[in-house]
Each structure stands twice: as structure tokens, then as C-alpha cells.
Amino acid sequence: MQLQDPLARLAAVIDSRKPALGGDPSASYVARLLHKGPDAFLKKIGEEATEAVMAAKDAEHGGATPALKAKFVNEVADLWFHSMVALAHFDLSPADVIAELERREGTSGIEEKALRKVLAREAQTPGAAHE
């Protein structure tokens, strides 16, 4: 199974619902979110992230039963979906995220995080890039 295929298909549906492409906010949840703007879909991302965390904690403390695992998967699916709406708003796709994950492949997470901190400090320090 190619992971990107279902994500690419979903991204195409989300793109087709953009109000600028004729998506009708009265007939489409995605079009409504995009029509309302970033505050609407970013709020949903926050809600879904919180629900995913709570479902994971329930699974951890409830013995990770099939029902609790399914609840966690459902919440992660909601989180991914709303994140994909945000990606579409910025004319990005799951392929962009997958490319970033592939770029990171083989890099220690600890090293990656440390490098991001260094780059962030350099970006905040005027002239640091020229030293």
C-alpha cells in the first residue's frame, strides 16, 4: 500500500472544495472551513490535537483495548484531516509534508531539534549569518 495515495486523493477532494474553485460553503464542510478562514480550521486542529491526546491517554490507562485504540485512530484521522485543510489553504499538500519527513530520514531527532534551535537563534540575531 502506498501511504501517499489515499492522502493525495483526499487532498484533491479538499482542493476541489476551495471556495475560489467553486466550493459551496453551504454544501461542503471543507468549503465552509476554508471560507471562514484560518481561525476556523486552526481552531479545529487545536481541538482535534487535544482530543487525540486525551484518546491516547485513555488508551494508555485503559489497557489499550481495541475500542480505545480505535478511538485514538479516529482522533488522529480527524487531526490529519483538519491539518490537510490547512495545508490546502496555503497551497501545500501531503506530498510537501512527506518530502520533509524524507529529508529528515536518517537524522537523529535530537540532532534535528538542536539544529532547529541554532537556526532559530541565528535568525533572531541580526548579522549572525554574516559572521
Image (cartoon, rainbow, N blue to C red):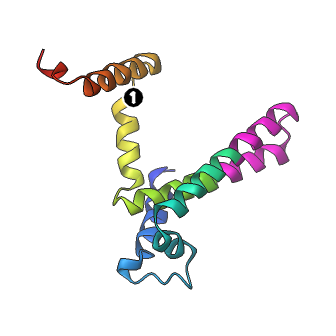
Residue identified by numbered label 1: 105
11 relative to 82 in the view: left or right: left
Residue 108, above or below 94: above
Residue 94, above or below 9: above
Q: Residue at x 41, y 70 (%)?
A: 15
- For label 1, the crowd category at 10 Å Cα-Cα, with few meaning under 14, some 14 to 19 and many 20 or more, is few
Q: Residue at x 84, y 48 (%)?
A: 67
Q: Dominant secondary structure of the magenta stretch?
A: helix
The foreground one among 86 and 42 is: 42
Which image quarter: residue 101? top left
**Total marks in image:** 1
Q: Is residue 15 magenta?
A: no
Q: Residue 23 at what x, y percent from top left?
A: 45, 81
Q: Residue 129 at what x, y percent from top left?
A: 16, 22
Q: Residue furthest left?
A: 130
Q: Residue furthest right?
A: 62
Q: Residue 125 at what x, y percent from top left?
A: 25, 22
Which residues, given as a range, are shown in magenta?
A: 51-76
Q: Residue at x 35, y 78 (%)?
A: 20
Q: Residue 106 at what x, y percent from top left?
A: 39, 23
Q: What amino acid type should be assigned to the residue bearing mark 1?
A: Glu
Regarding mark 1 in the picture, which secondary structure is present there? loop
92 relative to 3 in the view: left or right: left
Residue 108, above or below 19: above
Q: In which quadrant will I find the C terminus?
A: top left
Which image quarter: residue 93? bottom left
